[in-house]
Image (cartoon, rainbow, N blue to C red):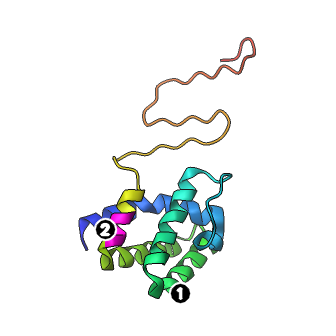
Amino acid sequence: MSAEIVQLVEQAGPYVASAVGAYGTAVLTRAEDAAVDATANLGRRILQAVLRRRPGQAAELEGAVDDAAADPDDADAAAALRQQLKRALREDAELRAELAGLLPSGGITITASGTRSIAAYSIGTVNIDNGRPGTR
């Protein structure tokens, strides 16, 4: 297996897991949802791209998504879903290019979502002033 495929699957993994966690089994058919964070929406787009380009693998992909959605903490279910992604990427160079275009370039992606969220790669001290005297 090429290093490119391994890297793509490793990069896509957190997005796919977030999408499966947010959407459950509807991830393969659901439209983008403004209420769901960008990570989950990207994972949804990744899975839908695989499904669109590999309709012959739809049943296997849907089964892997069902298993991962049923028990998000099941490492075996997550591994089975990653295996489906690897197979699809190994067999389809155009899909590899499409996923590479969807995934953020660079090595680090940090997302913060929600009121007063903080996202940082490296951080020393964070002071949050909520507007009340004596709170920092």
Circle 1: residue type: Ala
**Cα separation between marks 1 and 2:** 22 Å
Which percent across, then down, holds residue 136?
65, 18
Circle 2: residue type: Ile
Asked if 131 appears above or below 55 in the picture, the reply is above
Q: Which residues are magenta?
A: 94-98
Magenta stretch contains residue 97: yes
- N-terminal of the pair, mark 1 or mark 2, is 2
Of the pair 16 and 135, the residue shown nearer to us: 16
Which percent across, then down, holds residue 126?
55, 24
Quarter of the picture containing the N terminus is bottom left
Mark 2 neighbour density, 10 Å: few (under 14) some (14–19) many (20 or more)? some
Mark 1–mark 2 CB contact (< 8 Å) = no
Considering every residue shown, the one lying at the far left of the view is: 2
**Residue 89 as seen in the image, left or right of residue 27:** left
Q: Is residue 127 visible?
A: yes
Asked if 40 appears above or below 59 in the picture, the reply is above
**Which image quadrant for residue 118?**
top right
Marker disc for residue 109: none
Q: Which residue in the structure is indicated by mark 1? A: 59
Asked if 60 appears above or below 82 in the picture, the reply is below
Magenta stretch contains residue 71: no
**Residue 69 as seen in the image, left or right of residue 119:** right
| Dominant secondary structure, magenta | helix
Which percent across, then down, holds residue 56?
45, 88
Q: Which residue in the structure is indicated by mark 2? A: 5
Secondary element at tag 1: helix
Q: Residue at x 37, y 79 (%)?
A: 87
Q: Is residue 71 visible?
A: no
